[in-house]
Each structure stands twice: as C-alpha cells, then as structure tokens.
Image (cartoon, rainbow, N blue to C red):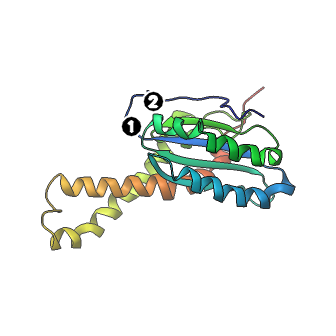
Amino acid sequence: MNNKPTSMSVDGKSSGKSVTLFIQQRVRADAIARYEEWLRTIAAKAAEYPGHQGVHIIRPPSGGNEYAILIRFASATDAERWTSSADRQRLLAEIDDAFEREDRFEIQPGIAFWFSPPSPVQKKPAPWKQWLITTSVIWPLTMLIPPLFKPLFAAVPLLGQWGISHGIIAATIVALVVFLIMPRYVHAVSRWLFQPKRE
C-alpha cells in the first residue's frame, strides 16, 4: 500500500483559501479497536502542523467499517505539507495491515467535500440536492443566531456596529455549519443524497 491519493482537487496551490482534507478509510472488523487508538494518535500529530484548523471524524454506523476524516487547513499548501510528511507516512505504515483497501483522500476547497460520494459506486448528488441541503441548514441559522447576539451588541456597542455585527454573525453561522451541523446532517441523509450509479 503506497497511500497516495486516488484523486485530488486543489483550489490553487498559492491560494490562501482554507481547504478540507477528506480521507476515507475502510478498516477490518477485527482491527477497529486498534485503529481507533491509532486515529487519536495521528489526529494529534496532524494538529501540530502549520495551518491546522480542526478535525472531524465521521464514524460508521454499528456494524460498518467505513470511516471519513475531515481535517481543515488554512491553505492547500498546508494540507499538502501534512499529506506528504514523513510523520503521516510513518503512522500509516503502522496501521497498514488494518485497512481493507488503500486509504483515499482529496483536498477540496470550501464545503465541496460534503458532497463527495463516500463510495466509488455512488454518484455525486445533483446540484438541486446540494442546494436544498445547504439552504435547509443556513436558513434557520440566519433566523436563530442574530437574536442571540442582541444582548452582546447592546452591551458592547462597538460590536453592534454595521459590518462588525454582520461579520460576527456570519463567522458563527459558518463555524456551526462546517464543524457541527453538516457532518451529522449529511451522514444522516447520505442514503438519499448519494444514489448508486446506474450500470
């Protein structure tokens, strides 16, 4: 197993936009306990690298063995620094025998990674499904979050000024979408979202 990407899309190596490293790993049933311990180790090591902005692990349902790991980096260059590092290669070599297949990863800009099919036999969701999922998450947040900040803006008028208040609200909504809601939401509707490819 050489642990090279099966596919990779990068939003320009010189771009300063944050990206997500989307990793899929299929683990042998008898090695899951050892893999879980290893996963904590490699996640901690990745966090030591420049540009690391957080990690989210989507574990399989009971009886499953397909893991998805989402690691945010400040730029594609930062993500590639980690994926090509000696630390990552060494840690992958330690768990190599626990995988049913070679691990797959992609570097994706923005929130595009949420709509990457978890399996090669599934197709990318139609644009209207992506729109519906994204809208159904952001719409209620735009109604719920602003009122929550009103006491803060009233207490600190500087934060309530036009532009500043919008930035605080937008940053809060984006953080909730990216790190809390979307991982669970997409996983919950994955059967509807990612339809099998037709022969």
Kindly identify the residue that appears in the image at 29 percent across and 57 percent down.
169
Q: What residue does disc 1 label?
A: 17
Instruction: Indicate whether 48 appears above or below 119.
Output: below
Residue 128 in view, yes or no = no
When the figure is inspected, residue 27 is found, relative to residue 157, above or below; the finding is: above
Crowding at label 1, few (<14), some or many (≥20) Cα neighbours within 10 Å?
Answer: some
Say what amino acid the circle numbered 2 marks.
Answer: Asp
Q: Quadrant of residue 75?
A: top left
Residue 174, percent from left and from top:
39, 52
Q: Which residue is identified by label 2? A: 11
Q: Are marks 1 and 2 in contact (CB under 8 Å)?
A: yes
Near mark 2 (Cα within 10 A), the count class, few <14, some 14-19 or many ≥20, is some
Residue at 19 percent across and 55 percent down: it is: 164
Compared with 179, 128 (above or below) is above
Q: Earlier in the sequence, mark 1 or mark 2?
A: 2
- The image's mark for residue 147 is none
